[in-house]
Amino acid sequence: MFPEYDVIVIGAGHAGCEAAAAAANMGSKVLLITMNMQTIGQMSCNPAMGGVAKGQIVREIDALGGYSGIISDKSMIQFRMLNLSKGPAMWSPRTQNDRALFSEEWRLALERTTNVDFWQEMVTGILVKDNKVFGVKTSLGIDIKGKSVVLTNGTFLNGKIHIGEKNFGGGRTAEKAATGITEQLVNLGFESGRMKTGTPPRVDGRSLNYNNMTEQPGDLNPGKFSFSGTKPLTKQASCWITYTNSEVHKELEKGFAQSPMFQGRIEGVGPRYCPSIEDKINRFAERDRHQIFVEPEGWNTIEVYVNGFSSSLPEAVQYEGLKKIPGFEKVKMFRPGYAIEYDYFPPTQLKSTLETQLIDNLYFAGQINGTTGYEEAACQGLMAGINAHNKVKEKEPFVLKRSEAYIGVLIDDLINKGTQEPYRMFTSRAEYRILLRQDNADLRLTGLGHKIGLASEERLSNVIDKKKKIASCLSELNKLKASPEDANSLLLDLKTSPIEEKISAINLLKRTEIGFSELIKINSTFETTLKEFDKEILEQVEIIVKYQPYIEREQKLADKIESLEDYKIKSDFDYDRVKALSSEAREKLKKIKPETIGQMSRISGVSPADVSVISVYLGR
């Protein structure tokens, strides 16, 4: 009934979709197995993509040739660039999306991908022989052969949903949990754990009074995620902001005695940076209000997502609390919020390719690795799909460095440090964040994506053209000169020091007070020359000019650290032979099995002295 596949992907969430698309577009024969063909690419939580650090990841996925940026652009109803008041390393794109359209666009994209086949059923186990995976077993008892398997099970592995004192099995509301895989993996020697996440109630937008809220419109000139030809929005939907208050908190506190979180019925650890409303009230008792984002679910629906009100309290308690929020006085609730517990596998059991150390050709991606967030899952799926393809086609592994991408930071953090709570990406996790900006993701990564056969020839051509235009613009700015007669009146108005002799336009642009809009006022020649370059090129050039010292400093540091990545360590290296190692370092190194000295240096519990000992032992 089934041929042998190169790559079998289990789960069709954000990780599974990217894994299937990547492997198929690189030339592998792929089978995508999901329990429900109607929920491919579903946004299980809020209908939005991107945000701080997460927006950078979406742009990186797109630059490499993945689909998340394109799907987000095709389904967005609002676009905002966050943190524009800060430096460009912090600028982060975010879209509000049409939930149904997002899922539909993902399914259409996959159905148009020639090498992807689909099968709807639960997978109950993997087929393993001699520590190597060779397929999967389904609930109908069907064995499907595959040269590699990517597990992207999300919250479905032994998932349990909690609403007040009620709990029941489920991987998502109204969907059953997946069983069998955890138990088999534990029997094979894997370590597993439990994590928890939650979601807020959904409500009827017709029942809300938006006059009692603050409108949050999209950007005046909306951007987009993808570097391809997707179109920016011509109309946008607004989100709204309101707040809880002491009355809301009092209503919710009435249900604390029935809270599964406070009564110990939830074993899993939840995301620290996205706590439930009851957790916020409990942990931040000194605060009399918490922000609520009121987010429409799409163009053609009245359903609204109440961001900031995640809860597992009894449904009646949730409803009474909602009614005390300004604008929610007459609210009608579609469904209550809930908490969900699920199995995960500590990611220190993985290689840098996301292949497991215990079983060859078996890959984990997404929430199974202890992460939270669509974007974190999608980039892991992309990397797992790429590496599963490369492994079965006998090609070199594809691993991104910390200095190359937020994706590299995320995977490096997971495999070296592990996580005791759902891992979420922040700009603060990246030591080279001035290099890893959202605006230059294509310049950083499209060449790499093209080299492995994922990013198209057209994508590469666009990047080459962009680099030429940036170089040309920088050259022109060096040639253009401003005289004191032309410039000083404007400089004084801008409260920046006047010039005493002619200087280049590039030196004027280095000043914080001067951007291109100010520069073209100095001399009509400037305006004529700069009209040749579009907004994207001018933005890149201004960042390069203003932040050049910081960019160069980070690049030098990255180059210095990178030299450690060239020193390889064999996977069967015997750390017990190195007597000078600390006992903690020996234990960690035997468990994680770092592939390079650089990776070793980032493992928690391995000191610089331990790194030096190994370096000397290896003759480095």
Image (tube, rainbow, N blue to C red):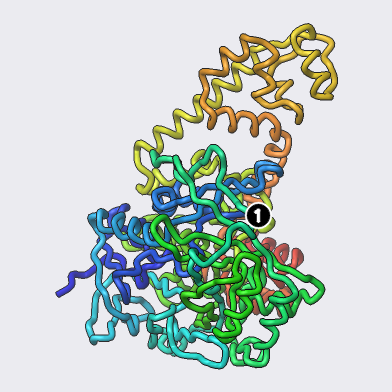
Q: In which quarter of the image is residue 241?
A: bottom right
Label 1 neighbour load within 10 Å: few <14, some 14-19, many 20+: many
Q: Which of 383 and 261 is in front in this view?
A: 261
Please provide percent x and percent y for residue 317: 60, 84
Residue type at numbered disc 1: Thr
Please provide percent x and percent y for residue 616: 69, 62
Which residue in the structure is indicated by mark 1? 427
Q: Which of 386 and 287 is in front in this view?
A: 287
Using the rendered image of the protein, determine whether residue 573 is visible from the camera's viewpoint. Answer: no
Identify the residue shown where x is 53% and y is 53%.
57
| SS label for mark 1 | helix
Q: Quadrant of residue 521?
A: top right
Asked if residue 197 lies left or right of residue 545, the reply is: left
Give the position of the N terminus as an image quadrant. bottom left
Give the position of the C terminus as an image quadrant. bottom right
Identify the residue shown where x is 72% and y is 76%.
247
